[in-house]
Image: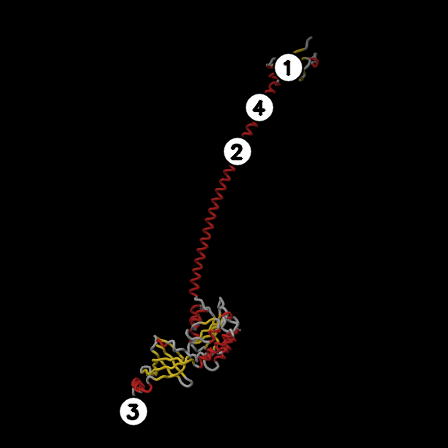
Amino acid sequence: MEAITVSRFNQYIKQIFDSEELIHNVSIVGEVFGKSITRNVIYFSVKDEEATLSCVCFYPAFNDLIVEGAKVIITGSPNYYVRGGKLNFNVVKVEPIGIGNLYEEFLKLKQKLEDEGLFNPSNKKTLPKVINRIGVITSKEGAVIQDIKNVAWRRNPFLDIVLYNTRVQGIGAEDEIANAIDKLGNYKNIDLIIVARGGGTLEDLSAYNTEKVARATYNCPLPIISAVGHETDFTIIDFVSDLRAPTPSAAAELVTFNIEDKKHELKILTNSFYRAARNYFNAKIDNLEYYKMVLINNFEKKLSNDFNIISKLNQTILTSYENNINQRLYEIGLIENTLNKLNPQEILKRGYAKIEQNGETIKELKSLDKAKNFEIMFVDGKIKAKYKE
């Protein structure tokens, strides 16, 4: 048989599906999982205990009816995509009929733990203000740890990241995750823990919807951030953890500061400090100038007052001195007049004479030695004389 191209073969398959009327406009019951939306097109799958079926819905109005874990009846037709070689079930109608078994178990456990107080906000620990080292619980093989490292180290290259490698789905995953939380919770110098994995179906995320992981999270002494799945995915650990991040990358942002932002903030604070310091010192200089002028004015006033006081005192002293001098001159004048009156020359000028004998003044006749000569002194000279009866 001659070989045919892939596109030709896929065309044959499509023709088979398109020509089979029995499978057109058929209704199927199943549990929704793996839902995603791209450009208003809803992609999801339905499953039962033994098989799964990929579906696509071009009607955005059915979005609220297509819920992860819900049981639905979908109506539509199979469509084989030639270019991609993939079969999809094109859904034209959705009827919810309840919840799936896995989702029902999720709700029961959620209610149980909530009743016990594991979700109580008062029990949640606050994140530390300074974060130098974080523990990350996820698979070392996935993109999650790389996303966390890329975001965290881009924002803060000094952050230390400790990875605890675990499976994120499948048998034994819940035990590994719970054990990792216990171990890292008692690890020295770790500030907080991030439990992370990428998005997936409710079944893919089942390890994070277990009571064992929930209780390990609740009992952990360190703050825990859950970053499991996409923004629309909610798991039990999200309700128990101290903080939920919509994605692993968002968790990395929550625990790090942007170093460029910090540099900018530091620059702003530095400039503010310089401005405040400059204004402070300028104000102090202005105050000093003001007090300088006040001091100079006060000093000048004091000097002026003191000068006036000294001038007045000086004038008083001079006046007193002059008065004292005049008084003394007057007194001297009186004394001088008295002395002049007592001056022998002045007495002689008035016609009196002075008799001396042997250098002594003779005041009485009986004191005169009549046998000897004596001198008679006049104002203009003296003569020698001898007593004669």
* Residue occupied by mark 3: 1
- Residue 96's quadrant in the figure? bottom left
Circle nearer the N terminus (3, 2): 3
Label 4, secondary structure: give it.
Answer: helix
Q: Amino acid at mark 3?
A: Met
Alpha carbon distance from label 4 to label 3: 168 Å
* Residue occupied by mark 4: 330
User: Where is residue 21 drawn, in percent x and y?
Assistant: 31, 86
Circle nearer the N terminus (4, 1): 4
* Residue occupied by mark 1: 354
Callout 4 environment at 10 Å: few (<14), some (14 to 19), or many (20+)? Answer: few
Q: Amino acid at mark 2?
A: Lys
Foreground tag (4 vs 3): 3
Label 3, secondary structure: give it.
Answer: loop
Circle nearer the N terminus (3, 1): 3
Q: Amino acid at mark 4?
A: Tyr
User: Where is residue 326 drawn, in percent x and y?
Assistant: 56, 26
Label 2, secondary structure: give it.
Answer: helix
Foreground tag (2 vs 4): 2
Alpha carbon distance from label 3 to label 1: 195 Å
Q: As displayed, is residue 373 above or below residue 272? A: above
Foreground tag (4 vs 1): 4
Circle nearer the N terminus (4, 3): 3
Alpha carbon distance from label 2 to label 1: 56 Å
Q: Could you tell whether 345 is left or right of 89 in the image?
A: right
Query: Which residue is pictured at 48% across the width and 79% down the height?
Result: 174
Q: Nearer the viewer, residue 158 or 237?
A: 237
Q: As displayed, is residue 86 above or below residue 322? A: below
* Residue occupied by mark 2: 312
Quarter of the image that includes the C terminus = top right
